C-alpha cells in the first residue's frame, strides 16, 4: 500500500478510537492500538515502524519469527503480541523472542503450563491474557465464562506467567447490538474477576469491524488489521 494511504488509515483508526473513548468518557491514551500484520508485507510494516508505530500483533508463530528476524536484521525492533491459537510445541520459539511482549491467547491449562515452563527456561516472566469464548462460538477457542474464575485461580500459581487480563475473539456479525452485548459481558466478567481473584488491567477485544464498540464498552487493547492495511493478500 502507498505510504500516505497506510499512515492515513492508521491515523483514522486512532481518531475513531479517540472519538469512541470520548463517547464513553474514557481517556483514549489508556487504549493500545495493536496493528495486526498477519499476511501483510514487510514493507508495509516498516512504513508504520518508521512512522513511530511500535505495537504489532501476529497469530502464526512461524510468520512472526520470520518477520522479526528480517526486521531485526535491519535494526528495527518492534513489540509483538501473539494473538492466535498457540500450539504447545510452538511455545519455545516465542519464548526465545525477547520482544514478544505478550501472549494474548492462553486458552487451556496445558498451554499455560507449557508457557510457564518455557518462560522459566528462558529466565523471563511473560505477560499473558486469558482467552474467553464469550459468544460460545464452536469455531473459536477460549475458556467458557463459567470456568474463567477457576481457570484464573489455577494459573495465577505459575511463577513465570504474569496474568494481566482477558481477551476475546467474536464471530463476525453485522448486528451491532449483539456485538455490544458480548463486549458488555466481557467487561462484566473482567470486573468480577478483578474484584474476586486478582486485579486485572488489560481487556483485549475488538477488531476492524467492531473496535469502536469495544472501546465504548471498556477495551484497553484493540486488534486492528484490515482497517489499517486494507484486505489481506494471501
Image: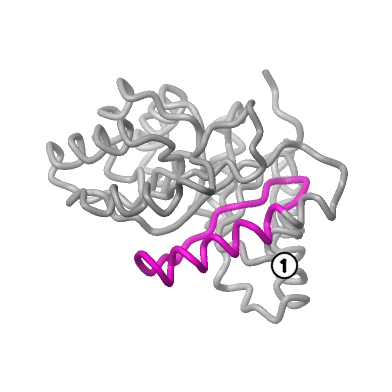
Residue appearing at x 25%, y 36% in the figure: 113
Q: Can you identify the residue that label 1 sits on?
A: 216
Q: Position of residue 21 (x, y in %)?
A: 70, 72
Residue 105, by quadrant, is: top left
Q: Position of residue 10 (x, y in %)?
A: 69, 53
* Looking at the image, residue 174 lies above or below residue 43: below
Secondary structure under the numbered disc 1 in the rendered image? helix
Horizontal placement of 204 versus 92: left or right? right
Residue appearing at x 87%, y 42% in the figure: 174
Horizontal placement of 175 versus 91: left or right? right
Q: From the viewer's side, name the closer residue of 10 and 177.
A: 177
Which quarter of the image is occupied by the N terminus?
A: top right
Is 159 in the magenta? no
Q: Position of residue 114 (x, y in %)?
A: 25, 32
Read off the magenta span: 182-210
Residue 153, by quadrant, is: bottom left
Horizontal placement of 79 versus 112: left or right? right
Extreme residue toward the bottom, this view? 25
Q: Give the number of callouts.
A: 1
Residue appearing at x 42%, y 47% in the figure: 78
Q: Position of residue 34 (x, y in %)?
A: 56, 51
Q: From the viewer's side, name the closer residue of 30 and 153.
A: 153
Which quarter of the image is occupied by the C terminus?
A: top right
Amino acid at each position: 500500500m502507498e505510504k500516505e494511504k497506510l499512515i492515513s488509515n492508521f491515523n483514522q483508526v486512532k481518531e475513531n478510537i479517540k472519538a469512541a473513548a470520548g463517547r464513553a468518557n474514557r481517556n483514549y491514551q489508556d487504549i493500545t492500538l495493536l496493528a495486526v500484520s498477519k499476511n501483510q508485507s514487510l514493507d508495509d510494516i516498516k512504513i508504520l515502524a518508521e512512522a513511530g508505530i511500535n505495537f504489532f500483533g501476529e497469530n502464526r508463530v512461524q510468520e512472526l519469527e520470520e518477520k522479526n528476524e528480517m526486521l531485526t536484521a535491519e535494526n528495527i525492533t518492534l513489540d509483538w503480541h501473539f494473538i492466535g491459537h498457540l500450539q504447545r510445541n510452538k511455545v519455545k520459539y516465542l519464548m526465545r523472542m525477547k520482544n514478544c511482549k505478550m501472549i494474548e491467547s492462553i486458552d487451556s491449562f496445558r498451554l499455560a503450563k507449557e508457557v510457564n515452563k518455557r518462560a522459566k527456561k528462558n529466565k523471563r516472566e511473560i505477560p499473558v491474557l486469558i482467552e474467553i469464548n464469550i459468544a460460545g462460538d464452536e469455531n473459536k477457542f477460549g475458556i467458557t465464562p463459567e470456568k474463567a474464575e477457576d481457570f484464573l485461580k489455577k494459573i495465577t500459581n505459575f511463577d513465570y506467567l504474569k496474568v494481566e487480563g482477558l481477551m476475546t475473539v467474536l464471530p463476525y456479525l453485522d448486528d451491532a447490538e449483539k456485538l455490544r452485548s458480548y463486549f458488555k459481558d466481557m467487561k462484566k466478567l473482567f470486573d468480577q474477576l478483578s474484584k474476586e481473584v486478582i486485579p486485572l488491567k488489560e481487556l483485549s477485544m475488538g477488531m476492524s469491524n467492531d473496535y469502536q464498540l469495544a472501546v465504548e464498552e471498556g477495551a484497553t487493547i484493540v486488534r486492528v488489521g484490515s482497517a489499517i492495511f486494507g484486505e489481506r493478500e494471501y
